[in-house]
Amino acid sequence: MNRRAASLKDGLIRPSILVSKLQSMQRQNPLQQALQEVGRVAKTLH
């Protein structure tokens, strides 16, 4: 997850490409699950 975040921050990958790659992976991908949990935490805090 940190590697993907650093790539986004450095501009090495566009967010749309990352999202499309995550969508094409298996449903139980650990990175995808971690990002979903981060999203849930952000929603809970607001």
Image (spheres, rainbow, N blue to C red):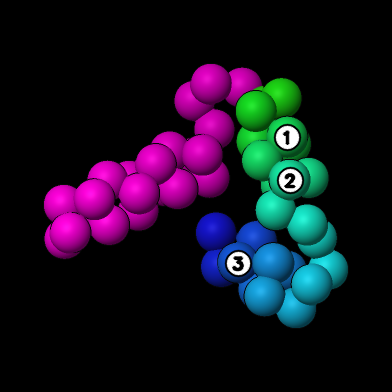
- Quick one: SS at disc 3? helix
Earlier-in-chain disc, 2 versus 3 = 3
- Quick one: SS at disc 2? helix
Evaluate if marks 1 and 2 touch, with contact meaning CB atoms under 8 Å apart: yes
* Residue bearing mark 2: 16
Taking the spot 53% from the left edge, 45% from the top edge, the residue there is 31
Taking the spot 49% from the left edge, 25% from the top edge, the residue there is 28
Taking the spot 73% from the left edge, 34% from the top edge, the residue there is 20
Name, please, the residue furthest toward the bottom.
Answer: 10
Q: Amino acid at mark 2?
A: Ser
Residue 20 is tagged as 1
Residue 41 rendering spot, x and y as whole percentages: 24, 54
Q: Amino acid at mark 1?
A: Ser
Badge 1: few (under 14), some or many (20 or more) residues near its Cα, within 10 Å? few
**C-alpha span from label 2 to label 3:** 13 Å
Q: Amino acid at mark 3?
A: Ala
Which of the image's four quarters has the C terminus?
bottom left
Evaluate if marks 1 and 3 touch, with contact meaning CB atoms under 8 Å apart: no
Dividing the picture into quarters, in which one does residue 8 lie? bottom right
Magenta stretch encompasses residue 39: yes
Badge 2: few (under 14), some or many (20 or more) residues near its Cα, within 10 Å? few
Dividing the picture into quarters, in which one does residue 45 lie? bottom left
Earlier-in-chain disc, 1 versus 3 = 3
Q: Which residues are magenta?
A: 26-46
* Residue bearing mark 3: 5
Residue in the foreground of this view, choosing between 38 and 15: 15
